[in-house]
Amino acid sequence: MSASAGTGVFVLSLMSIPICYLFNSLIYSNSAEAFFFAGCTTVLILVISARFMLKKKAPVDPLFYVYAVFAFLSVVNLIIGLEQDNIIDGFVTFYFKVASVADPHIKTAHGHMISYWDGCVHYLMYLLMIAAITWGDSYRAIGLYWVGSFLMRAIVYILGNAVGKYGTQVGLFLLHMLYILVSVWACFRIISQPSTRDVRSTIVLDCSSKWCQDYTQHYEPYLKDPLAYPKVQMLVSMLYSGPYYVITLYGLLVPGCEWMPDLTLVHSGAVAQAQFSHIGASLHTRTPFSYRVPAASQPVFLLVNVLYAVVPQALCYRCRTRPAFFLKPTADKKAE
């Protein structure tokens, strides 16, 4: 397949920059002609991009088109994050006015870090998977990493919205659910692809021990934020990572556990997304001062949380680069 399809997706994703700026400028002009011009321009840009993308041969993998849309939305999320930090201005101001009622999550520290993660890390993964589809290569490894990252984000977002202080404001929740449903379908498609291989939570539950209370007060007060995202994050990590490490210990001791490399990819993607959001939100100025990590405690906080993020990545690297231990002996396969 020609590389033009993948290049077209990249061009299409970058078109979100002028489209956002154009709509933001014209929405405030309060002119019917301006709205018509904005609509026509957007349609023209999308048509030209699609024509360039499919100039030679349309990809048969439906995930190509899903990732093309997600890549476009990832750049929009990056624009949202940059404008919230006042690095750029005049691109999505109209959205912030709507989001204050319809999607207040986007203005929290957790939502802020999600915007950067989606706009940078997820965007890179989408482009890599699109490139793999374009060239006919397997993208299962990257896809499984994305599956873990997406699932962690979705679980924390849904539960955090349900039990946090914004639980009564649904707004764009149904639109997010559509995005989540499509993503879950993509997850199942990735997991079903054939494998190609060569040879901290008791604190959140209000633990009464002095150590837990001191740690919460002096090192991670963000865990008590009423938004509920950090609480849900830690609970999911406990329920997800705890059993994972028990299973992993078995897989490291018993040869022939072929599921180990795939499982480490999903888990490392989930932990990377979770720790990026948790560390960033714990230090971000959008988090109330009383819930931010004290300056004197930041070295310990960073050491603990960075180590928690790095260890799964190192284990995943070990499993993917030296998979022979996890492959069943040839004699066993023949016997089966």
Image (tube, helix red, strand yellow):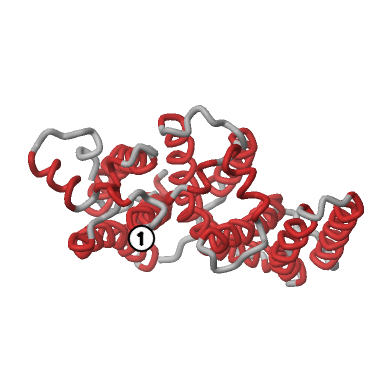
Q: In the structure shown, which secondary structural element does the residue marked by tag 1 occupy?
A: helix
Check disc 1 and report the residue beneath it.
316
Q: Is residue 138 visible?
A: no
User: Would residue 190 be seen by someone viewing this image from the given angle?
Assistant: yes
Amino acid tagged 1: Cys
Q: Residue at x 18, y 46 (%)?
A: 217
Residue 88 coordinates in the image, percent (x, y): 59, 67
Q: Is residue 310 left or right of residue 18?
A: left
Residue plotted at (84% across, 57% down): 38
Report x, y in % for residue 137.
61, 65
Measured as percent of width and height from the top left, residue 221 is found at 25, 47
- Name the residue furthest top: 168
Q: Nearer the viewer, residue 128 or 308?
A: 308
Instruction: Give residue 331's position: percent from left, percent from top.
Output: 37, 53
Q: Image quarter for residue 241?
A: top left
User: Dividing the image into 4 quarters, which one contains the C terminus?
Assistant: top left
